[in-house]
Amino acid sequence: MSLSQSDMNERLQDYGKRIESLAHSVGLDYYPVDFELVPNNFMNEVAIYGLPIRMPHWSFGVRYIHQLIRQSMGHSRIFEVMFPGNPCHGYLVNSNTLAENTLVTAHVLGHADFAKNNHLFARFAEMSGTNIVEHAAAQAHRIEQAVRDHGQQRVEALLDAALALEPHVDLDQELHRPLYPTHLKPAAPRGDEDSFTGRFRHLPGEIERAEASRERRTAPIPPHPESDLLWFIAHYGPELEDWERDVFLAVRYESFYFYPVFACNIMNEGWATYWHARLLREADFLPSDLYLDAVTCHSNVVRPFAGEQQAALAINPYHVGFSMWERIVEQQGLERAREIRRDEDDFGFIRNYLDAELAEKLGLFVFEAKSDEGIKVAGRDVNRIREAILAPKFNYGAPRIRVGEMKHDGTLVLVHDHEADGRGLDLERAARVVQYVHRAWRRPVLLQTVDSRGAPHELRSSAP
Amino acid sequence: MTFSPDPLLSRWQQPLRISAEVGWYDLFSRGARDWLRHNEKVRESVEKSLPNLIAGPDVLSGPGGGTVLVPVKLAEHARFRLRDTDGETGAGQGAGEDGQVLKPAQPQQGDQNGGDAGSGQGDLQFVLELKVEDVLDWLWEELKLPDLKPKASAREQDQEFVREGWDKRGVRSRLDRRRTVKQAIRRRAIQQDPAPFTDDDLRFRQLVRRDRPATNAAVIFALDVSGSMGETERQLAKTFFFFALQGIRRQYAKVEVAFLAHSAEAWEFNESQFFQTSGTGGTVSSTVFKLAKDVIKERYDPSQYNVYLFYASDGENLVDDREPSTEALRECCQGLNYGGFIEIRPAYGISPETELAGIFARMQRESLPLGMARVTGRDDVWNALRQFFQEQQARAEAA
């Protein structure tokens, strides 16, 4: 389709408006969406950074090269990016065809409905506000200012640590959570004057009740194992300056923002795909050739693997999610689907609504990768499939590591819950992360995990 | 829609190639500002690939240009991760019986377990195809190698203003747009919210007053090819010669090259023969200095050429040849901008001053335009170059 940019803009705006009113009429409920046509390299950057404007760090540069390579191999083409908020920001690629962008418009409306109504999204939006794009840009701006004020190396050292710990936040806590109480609660005055034990005190020769117990005792830090490493380091890092604390909290803020997207990936992409398919089908105002082009585009999106291949070593969340929603709507009705969209995340969604019949229909399987045998199909049992899909999502996809203790000399003791994770850490990487953390923490850092034989293993930071 | 690297994909990935079409600076474009911070790793890789630059038979006398392939390994920003176990599982989609092999085992996987710390499997290999001149430009900047200074002219007549080099200041009419834009692109790649142009980007062509023909340079490479110079030593000499020549080419419009080799006698060769020649018998370096003097006399009139001599040897020389060598070298110096001696010695032990090192040291004290550097490995080549170029620059400025 060869359309001038302005011509395409005009028609896209026209279709967009009509699709929006169609969406309202079928009950999609969302905050307004600001659509914007952007060049392809903008999309690449968003795919790399996760946000249009984000703090600079060399690791994003590595991702940039990955993306460059994927693109040059034709593996990766980004159609759409959408940031929830009020308003939401939807970005379309200006070099895509009108049919593709029409489809993407409908797709984004599906996401917008999901983001407003899903409880996980709603909870995080409540905590973090509805202007993530602007907020992240402001954070990036502050960090760049810090680079100018304190030098590249110092800021980079902090970001090495903070970004390495990105998923190590406690999502059950509030984004803005209070510090630990500084003192233990004084023991409640015992109303024991008349009690059985109280009588002993009045016996002749008993010493006066020790006054010390009434003094306020300093609480240990942390009072319990702390899994929000970013929060803990930000607030309890010895010698951390305010701007350094801000760097950790900025990464934590974004981590909170990313979580619902991460935890609802299959549901959310499936929901948006369900709605773009349905809205386009019902959009009788679209010319038939454009509709056909859009359908071709849709079938590419929900294609489980590249054309010449027989199988893929990953699931396509668009395909699986789309098929699941279609079936839910068909068997249980749209109202029930909306409730599920509101209540679940991928864990509940996959466990409750991916059954053996659908798994078989979708051709899902579990594979096993062994160094001597290669990658093999290892079974098609639906329980194993569910767990294989969900395994990378537990605990934000990261090992369970908590602050166990802060010693008197300021040593930070991190404890890996290897029993829950089933094995120890990759020691080479862990040693590097310990070293990153050490530079920010400025006191020794210890990490307890187990080695390949399951024997306790302790990693200790070395002086830089 | 966040980025989700597929661990299995990258683990089994073959090195990929990014062609020269992408362009060195495109890799550093807008979205890649953070990639720049990562380029330490690339620099290491490029340096490791430098032998490929000089692998061809005619790299010194050839026309230059061309590309070089540089394998690059991307550094990984470490995160906590569970250890890999054999028998990792995942969810897939498609056809296949139970037990069917979807991807055969990769034989090299086994070798990688051999304790190569830091080569995490998340690392990605790819191949950059770079233009040789870009690499050199960049090397010169990275290594802060000085540019050569043509010698000051003795005569006032026959002088003219000639374009030479560039400067940050100048009159508008001499603005070098290409260099200025190049500079601005580089700066913008690493700055946040960059201004399109700043005064610092401006590059002006320099005009200097000097002898008309002095834009020419002649480089005489002299090599000891006696039996004691083995393959490693020659390769080091070739590496040094290559980069020395590149440095000279950066400065002069026209560069002529002569190749002289000697053992007990000296001959002139073309390049391809030059590095393959091996002589027998003793080492008499006066022969090559005499030959150099003759070559200068016949072909490179010092009033028209900036003449450079680089001599590579293991430093051994016949003791009886000390006087003749000193004399021949002294005569040579009259026609030279600069003469450099690189002594190629194995790294082990502290060796006493060699015969030739002694000669050069004594002559240096007479403030003849000579320099000397010892090279034991490839890293020393840069130090030697830097040292020679700095000395030469200082001398030219003092003159």
Image (cartoon, rainbow, N blue to C red):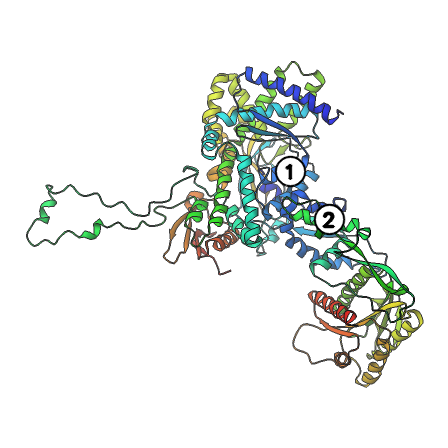
Q: Nearer the viewer, residue B235 or A342?
A: A342
- Residue B170 is labelled as none
Sort mark 2 into few (<14), some (14-19) or many (20+) by Cα contacts within 10 Å.
some
Query: Which residue is at a point 64% across and 38% down the rendered structure image?
Result: A44
Residue B374, picture quadrant: bottom right
Q: Nearer the viewer, residue B211 or A3?
A: B211
Identify whether B221 is placed above or below B6. below
Residue B13 pos. (x, y %): 65, 44
Marks 2 & 1 on one chain:
no
Could you tell me the amino acid type at mark 2?
Answer: Trp
Residue B58, picture quadrant: bottom right
Element carrying mark 2: loop
**Which residue is under mark 2?**
B24
Q: Nearer the viewer, residue B57 or A219?
A: A219
Query: Which residue is at a point 61% across and 40% down the rendered structure image?
Result: A48
Could you tell me the amino acid type at mark 1?
Answer: Asn
Looking at the image, residue A59 sits to the left or right of residue B16; the answer is: left
Q: Nearer the viewer, residue B173 or A16?
A: B173
Residue A113 pos. (x, y %): 53, 24
- Residue A44 is labelled as 1
Sort mark 1 into few (<14), some (14-19) or many (20+) by Cα contacts within 10 Å.
many
Identify whether A200 is placed above or below B269. above
Q: The N terminus of chain B lies in which quarter of the figure?
A: top right
Res. A280 visible in picture: yes
Furthest-left residue in this view:
A204
Residue B333 pos. (x, y %): 84, 76
Res. B5 visible in picture: no
Identify whether B240 is placed above or below B370. above
